[in-house]
């Protein structure tokens, strides 16, 4: 049997619409590999192997399924940007060099504070001193609030799926701030008052 991009896009759509679960995807991938089915191209082959080796590649979840669908439709692979922390290291170093900051990478297992809705734009970020597993980063959209429940703690690596576009800023040193939006605007500056908070 020849497996085509259209066939896999249909599976993506069924998963995204809740008509099938990840077990169907896993079974399909395993069956295709063991049956030695032919694939239309390398994108189809790579997608099937991604699905078959979830524990070594990417989680089969809603966000990644949208990214597989995008890759099947366009040939553009955004999965590493949304799943692999180290993909962003060179971008972090470039940002630090451009804004004269020492590169102080964020440990992906450390905690950052985020506002309730990070899907809006622009997004603001600032970095306080690092302490006890806290990366010092606080990110928010919309109006800032001093309310105690304005920020919730998350593991930094969860930003990969939520807002991969901000990972490039997380190498900035303590006392740096940024403002960025999804239209390409970005501003970075230092605010020494953040060192004392």
Image (cartoon, helix red, strand yellow):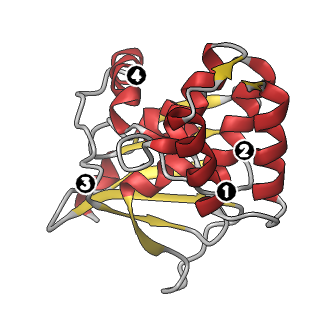
Can you identify the residue that label 1 sits on?
62
How much space separates mark 4 and mark 2, taking CA atoms? 34 Å
Q: What secondary structure is found at the residue carrying circle 1?
A: helix
Sequence-first tag of 3 and 1? 1
Residue found at x 14% / y 68%: 132
Q: Where is residue 106 in the image (x, y as percent from the top left)?
A: 28, 45
Q: How crowded is mark 2: few (under 14 residues within 10 Å), some or many (20 or more)?
A: some
User: Horizontal and vertical percent for residue 175?
Assistant: 32, 46
User: In the shown orientation, is residue 193 left or right of residue 77?
Assistant: left
Determine contact: label 2, label 3, CB under 8 Å.
Answer: no
Disc 1 crowd, CA 10 A, few/some/many (<14, 14-19, 20+) = some
Give above or below for 150 relative to 24. below
Q: Is the residue under label 4 in contact with that under label 1 (CB below 8 Å)?
A: no
Point out which mark residue 99 bears.
Answer: 4
Q: Which residue is the extreme one toward the bottom?
A: 148
Residue 79 is at least partly visible in this image: no
C-alpha span from label 2 to label 3: 40 Å
Q: In which quarter of the image is residue 3?
A: top right
167 vs 82, nearest the viewer = 82
Q: What element carries label 2?
A: helix
Relative side of 58 to 23, left or right: left
Q: Earlier in the sequence, mark 4 or mark 3?
A: 4
- Dot 3 corresponds to which residue? 195
Q: How many labels does the image show?
A: 4
Residue at x-position 19% and y-position 65%: 133
Give the labeled residue for mark 2.
66
Pick the front one: 94 or 194? 94
- Residue 129 x, y percent position in the rendering: 22, 56
Pointers 2 and 1 in contact (C-beta within 8 Å): yes
Residues marked 3 and 1 touching at CB (< 8 Å) = no
């Amino acid at each position: 049997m020849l497996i085509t991009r259209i066939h896999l896009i249909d599976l993506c759509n069924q998963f995204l619409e809740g008509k099938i679960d990840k077990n169907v995807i896993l079974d399909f991938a395993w069956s295709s590999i063991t049956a030695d089915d032919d694939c239309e191209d390398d994108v189809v082959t790579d997608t099937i192997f991604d699905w078959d080796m979830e524990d070594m590649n990417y989680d089969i979840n809603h966000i990644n399924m949208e990214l597989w669908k995008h890759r099947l439709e366009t040939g553009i692979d955004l999965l590493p940007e949304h799943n692999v922390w180290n993909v962003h290291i060179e971008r972090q170093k470039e940002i630090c060099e451009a804004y004269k900051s020492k590169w102080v990478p964020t440990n992906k297992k450390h905690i950052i504070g985020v506002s309730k809705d990070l899907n809006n734009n622009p997004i603001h970020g600032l970095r306080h001193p690092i302490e006890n597993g806290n990366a010092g980063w606080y990110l928010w959209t919309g109006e800032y609030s001093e309310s105690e429940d304005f920020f919730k703690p998350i593991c930094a690596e969860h930003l990969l799926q939520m807002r991969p576009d901000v990972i490039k800023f997380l190498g900035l040193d303590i006392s740096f701030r940024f403002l960025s939006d999804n239209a390409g605007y970005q501003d970075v500056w230092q605010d020494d008052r953040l060192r004392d908070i």
